[in-house]
Amino acid sequence: MTWASTAMQTVPAASPIGARLEDAGISTEIANSAAGVIRFVIAFLAVYFVGRAVVVPLVNRAMTRRDLDAHARKPLTLITQFGIIFVAIAIAFGFGGYGNFLVSMAGIAAAGTLAIGLAAQNVISNFVSGVFIYTDKPFKIGDWIEWDDYAGTVEDISLRVTRVRTFDNELLTVPNSELTNGVLKNPVESDKLRLKFVFGIGYDDDIEQASEIIVDEARNHPDILDDPAPSVRLTELGSSDVGLQSRIWIADPGRADFVRIRGEYVTSVKQRFDEEGVDIPYPVRTLEGGLELGNEKQIVEPAE
């Protein structure tokens, strides 16, 4: 085999683009390299613009059908765009003839991803939890939520953390995993909220009279619903009082409405109790015994 035939086998045939470059007087090696770069750029731009024209609108329509809030659409759209760029680069590498380079980069990327994943497990967990919050929608911005020993109004939701403003005006930055791995209470998710409050009356007071007062004051309050109707149940027989639990419903609940309505309602019931002689007792403790000083005498204190 001659040297010329060996050279012909080692040098790949020029592509149409490379052939045109060779015709322009560029050497075969440079022409082939330039042709690969040109194919890479053409493939990348083609896939990228097709993705922007087709995939992004499809994702936007899917988010519209799911009625996602504006704060949720921005990060998901950004993830979609990154995905399009990644796919465009991968296809462009293959189209440009850089297959071996792509395999090497894939191995490096896999090792780097493993190392980053082991070092950032909590971050990834919070990220995945953020995706679940966007898709499952257990709460939205403006909702009042409760979890563990915390409660507040949601001000912002991101893919890693959720920001909640407490009722003492403190801003809590909560990792999303804490809101998805435990029990989360969203009292304002529905259009109605039931409130419960226990009124304690004395054992000598009339239960029927006290119950009528509790129901009447609920009916007289403009923000308490008539349907479902307010109700009263005897729920407790305490050491010093009889517990009557009032159950009322309010519409379009929010934290401010909940606090205000309950406060006004309890105040009006207390005033009616005072006017009609219904007692709200407080616990009484009786202390008995004596105090001995030395061996001479004993002082006995009367019970109070």
Image (spheres, rainbow, N blue to C red):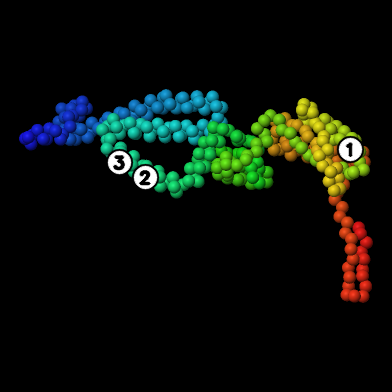
The Cα–Cα distance between marks 2 and 3, rounded to whole angstroms, is 11 Å
- Which numbered tag is attached to residue 254? none
Amino acid at circle 1: Ile
Q: Where is residue 149 in the image (x, y as percent from the top left)?
A: 66, 46
Local packing at callout 2 (Cα closer than 10 Å; few below 14, some 14-19, many 20+) is few
In the rendered image of this protein, does residue 226 appear above or below residue 269? above
- Tell me which numbered mark, 3 or 1, is placed earlier along the sequence: 3
Local packing at callout 1 (Cα closer than 10 Å; few below 14, some 14-19, many 20+) is some
Q: What element carries label 1?
A: helix
Q: Nearer the viewer, residue 32 or 116?
A: 116
Residue 32 as seen in the image, left or right of residue 77: left
Q: Is mark 2 on a helix, strand or loop?
A: helix
> In which image quadrant can residue 137 be found?
top right
**Residue 284 appears in the picture as rendered:** yes
Residue 288 as seen in the image, left or right of residue 38: right
Q: Name the residue under label 3.
A: 104
- Residue visible at 31% across and 31% down in the picture: 92
In the rendered image of this protein, does residue 119 appear above or below residue 136? below
Q: Which of 97 and 40 is in front in this view?
A: 97
Q: Where is residue 8 in the image (x, y as percent from the top left)?
A: 12, 32
- Tell me which numbered mark, 2 or 3, is placed earlier along the sequence: 3
Q: Mark 2 points at which residue?
A: 111
Q: Mark 1 points at which residue?
A: 207
